Image: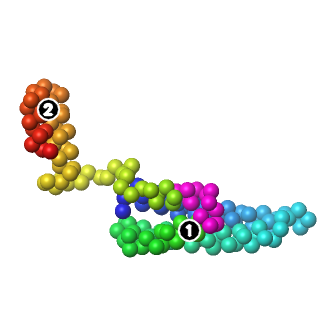
C-alpha cells in the first residue's frame, strides 16, 4: 500500500472518530434545551445512528490498513464498506472526501519513502546513475558526446 494512501485513510478514521464527538454534542444539546425549543426527536435518533456509523467506519478503516497496510488488497472490502457507509451518512464530511480521494491514489507517492537500499538493476538505481551523469556533465567532467554515450548505455 502506498504510504500516502495509508496516511489519508488513517486521517479519515480520526475524522470519523471526531464525528462521534460531534454527534454526542448534538445529543447533549438536545437534552439540555428547553422542551418547547427542542427540535424533532428524529434528530436525536439520527445522531445515535451517526454515532454507530462513525464508529463502524473508523473500525473498518483501521482494520483495512492493519499490519502496516500489507493486507490492504485482501481487506479491500472493509475499505469499500467504510466508504459506502460514510457516503450514505454524509457525503460532504471530511471522512467521505478523504476516502474518495484515496480511491484515485493508486501509485502516487506524495510522502517520500525512507531511503531504501539500491538494488542492482532496479529503476531506482538507474535514476541515481542518470542523476550522477547529469551532475558530472553540469560540472564539466563529461562532454556532451560522452554524456550522450553514457546515457544511451544506461537506457
Residue at 62%, 60% (x, y): give it. Answer: 91
Mark 2 nearby-residue class (10 Å; few <14, some 14–19, many ≥20): some
Residue farthest along the right direction in this orientation: 36
Residue at 26%, 51% (x, y): give it. Answer: 115
**Is the stretch drawn in magenta largely helix, strand or loop?**
helix
| Quarter occupied by residue 23 | bottom right
The answer to the question of whether label 2 and label 1 lie on touching residues, with beta carbons closer than 8 A, is: no
Q: Which quadrant, please, contains the N terminus? A: bottom left
Closer to the chain start, of discs 2 and 1, is 1
Q: Nearer the viewer, mark 2 or mark 1?
A: 1
Image location (x, y in percent) of residue 82: 53, 69
**Local SS, label 2:** helix
- Residue underneath mark 1: 84
Residue 56 in sight from this viewpoint: yes
The reply to whether the magenta stretch includes residue 95 is yes
120 or 80, nearer to the observer: 80
Image location (x, y in percent) of residue 60: 50, 72
Image location (x, y in percent) of residue 104: 44, 56
The reply to whether the magenta stretch includes residue 46 is no
Q: Which mark is residue 71?
A: none
Image location (x, y in percent) of residue 150: 9, 38
- In the image: residue 137, left or right of residue 44: left
Magenta region: which residues?
Answer: 87-98
**Local SS, label 1:** helix
- Residue underneath mark 2: 136
28 or 81, nearer to the observer: 81
Amino acid at each position: 500500500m502506498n504510504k500516502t494512501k495509508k496516511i489519508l485513510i488513517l486521517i479519515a478514521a480520526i475524522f470519523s472518530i471526531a464525528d462521534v464527538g460531534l454527534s454526542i454534542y448534538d445529543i447533549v444539546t438536545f437534552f439540555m434545551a428547553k422542551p418547547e425549543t427542542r427540535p424533532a426527536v428524529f434528530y436525536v435518533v439520527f445522531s445515535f445512528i451517526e454515532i454507530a456509523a462513525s464508529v463502524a467506519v473508523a473500525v473498518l478503516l483501521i482494520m483495512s490498513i492493519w499490519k502496516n497496510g500489507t493486507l490492504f488488497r485482501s481487506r479491500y472490502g472493509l475499505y469499500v464498506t467504510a466508504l459506502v457507509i460514510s457516503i450514505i451518512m454524509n457525503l460532504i464530511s471530511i471522512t467521505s472526501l478523504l476516502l474518495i480521494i484515496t480511491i484515485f491514489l493508486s501509485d502516487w507517492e506524495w510522502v517520500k519513502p525512507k531511503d531504501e537500499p539500491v538494488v542492482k538493476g532496479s529503476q531506482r538505481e538507474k535514476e541515481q546513475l542518470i542523476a550522477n551523469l547529469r551532475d558530472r556533465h553540469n560540472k564539466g567532467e563529461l562532454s556532451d558526446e560522452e554524456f550522450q554515450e553514457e546515457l544511451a548505455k544506461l537506457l
